[in-house]
Image (spheres, grey):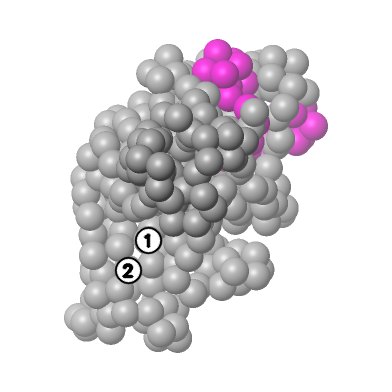
Amino acid sequence: MFDFVFLGTSASAPSVSRGLSAHMVLHQEYRFLIDCGEGTQRQILRSGFGFKRLTRILITHGHLDHILGLAGLLSTLTRWEAIEHVEIWAGRSALDRIRSLIFGVVFRGERAQFQIELRELEPGPILVEESFEMEAFPVNHRGGQCFGFIFKEPARRPFLNDKADELGVPHGPERRELVKGHSIQLPNGQTIDPDDVLGSTIPGTKLVHVGDAGTTDDLMEYCNNADALVIEATYLESDKLLAERFGHLTACQAAELARDANVNSLYLTHISRRYRTRDVLSEAAEVFPTVVVARDLDRFQVKRHN
Ligand SMILES: [Zn+2]
Ligand SMILES: [Zn+2]
């Protein structure tokens, strides 16, 4: 299970009700910040989660509405918070800009009081833990080196208690061994294999985050069967030419991707202040009914759907 918090849901410039791009993903003790538009640090405080353990920052791309908040956030972290180490993951061109912002402006002429690790994203796994993994994939948005992110729990096979009872498997360590995939031997000499007591594989929970994007065909394979897809919807179909020109999606295109990739729930973000939220919602809902147009500080849980 993952928790997802929208910290900023506006495109390009803030509006009265929407801040610039920033999102938080939580899984057990892990916290990730995805993008860090101007004003993000205050939104983190308003969300109630604070800065604790927020040591991994993922950047979808280097446009200013996604990175300018890093300056203020890092300044605060270094002066006020007991954080010793921050990792910032981004594509190469975004990292160049972030490096200038952090070391040319925020910490110009002084040493940051904690370690800031700038790490270049490549498509593929970034973090693989026992309970989940996270990977980056390429996204096409006005030039290269833009990335989306997949958070995924491992697939699992349920333990069939009835089957185990029937076979006389005692409760206790024997069952744990079978769950781990090891065969066991009963006191009567009979061997029980994991396949005897484990059901068929259930895929793990999958959350996909796409920042700004200009095309969707190339995203299908990554979004496939996601329990939740968070993606930009900067324009409406009535402004489709503008969307194409600036490398963004319409609400309809985002919804078509969700439908075609068999996504369970769709969350739209990066909303332009030129539109009313209800118009964005109705355009997307016509194609994909289980859609939400996110508002700042909205929070939802991502669980495996059946
Ligand atoms: Zn943007
Ligand atoms: Zn952009």
Whether residue 92 is in magenta: the answer is no
Say whether mark 1 is within 8 Å of ligand 1.
no
Asked whether residue 143 is in view, the answer is yes
Q: What residue does disc 1 label? A: 56
Magenta region:
255-281
Q: Is residue 182 left or right of residue 100?
A: right
Q: Residues within 10 Å of mark 2 (few under 14, many from 20)?
A: some
SS assignment at label 2: strand
Q: Are marks 2 and 1 in contact (CB under 8 Å)?
A: yes
The label number, if any, that marks residue 86 in the structure image: 2
Q: Position of residue 223 (x, y in %)?
A: 47, 26
Q: Is residue 108 left or right of residue 289?
A: left
Q: Position of residue 181 (x, y in %)?
A: 35, 40
Q: Position of residue 119 (x, y in %)?
A: 22, 55
Give the residue at x 46% y 37%.
156
Give the residue at x 54% y 53%.
171
Relative to 242, say whether 160 is above or below.
below
Give the residue at x 55% y 63%.
39
Q: Position of residue 238 (x, y in %)?
A: 66, 16
